[in-house]
Image: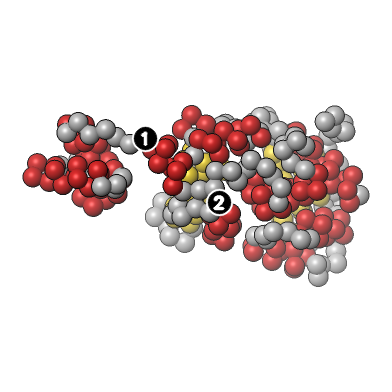
Amino acid sequence: MGVLKKIDKSEHANVVNLYLSGKSSNKISKLYKVSVTPIQRILRENNVKVRNQFLCGKTIFMDEFYFDKIDMPSKAYVLGLFYTDGNNHEPRARLAIGLNDLEVIEFIQKEFKTNKKIYEVPINGKDRKNIQYRLDITNRKVSAKLAEIGCKSNKTETLKFPDKIFLPIELVKFFILGCFDGDGCLIRYRNRFFRWNFIGTFDMCNQIKFFIEKTIKVSLKIRKAGKHRFLFCLDLYKLEEIKKLLRFLYDKAPFKMKRKYKMFLELENTKFIRKCPSTVLDIQEPTK
């Protein structure tokens, strides 16, 4: 795109007309193959009142009441995804989530009942083989509700497990599955052993650990995530307990990420056992 390219004065009236007819500055800039800046300058010079981008996003693109009540497995799952891989930029009321797995982003798009376009973003330069699929939506109401639940701006080091007034106990496992698909992994080490892993704040790891151990009686371990001051790893190494955990999470799940579910199916036919490491923390039962 030619950022410094100018638009001939004879086209200024047409730019104004296009904007007043409903086209956005971004779409007009693409028509003229310029950046948004000269489009906005032309609008200012012609005393055109620029539309509020937040209101445009609010009234057009999504189900504003989606997170008002987490009352379905699919909503709990999507909440888990936003808690881990999503971003809620409150000052701009901007919701964004990006993953390598297109089917997950398409599921969120369908859940939100939005026609907002999914963007392809090359992760490493121009290598089209490594693509992240991204959905960005601007909506003040949804952003505020997510923040109220606990999914706030700059949440990496401060994220806390949702309170039971927002997330019913019967839907917690679907929330955890969403968290696992966002920031968890199932690792196979040269066909020797598997490890189930989730990375998050201490509160997230501790609450997930407590719920899983109380519900299905498996023993998870918490350890520091390398040199990260505020991040921890929740690990499970025992083969049969990993199987038990994943069977529990996938049972009646509203959605299964293909890549991780495929590894689970491979795991079901595996029969070796690996002991877990001894470097763990002494965990106290959550108080809430």
Q: Spatial distance from mark 1 to mark 2, Cα to Cα?
A: 22 Å
Question: Taking 42 as reference, is 196 left or right?
Answer: right
Q: Nearer the viewer, residue 23 or 103?
A: 23
Residue drawn 49% across the image and 58% down it? 130
Q: Is residue 250 visible?
A: yes
Which residue carries the number 1 mark? 52
* Whether residue 153 is situated above or below residue 136 in the rendered picture: above
Residue drawn 70% across the image and 63% down it? 261
Residue drawn 76% across the image and 52% down it? 196
Which residue carries the number 2 mark? 112
- Tell me if mark 1 has few (under 14), some (14-19) or many (20+) residues whose alpha carbon lies within 10 angstroms of its own: few
Q: Amino acid at mark 1?
A: Asn
Name the quadrant of the C terminus: top right
- Picture coordinates of residue 56, whole percent (x, y): 40, 41
Q: Quadrant of residue 164?
A: top right
Question: Taking 52 as reference, is 195 left or right?
Answer: right
Residue found at the far left of this picture: 10
- Picture coordinates of residue 158, whole percent (x, y): 66, 29
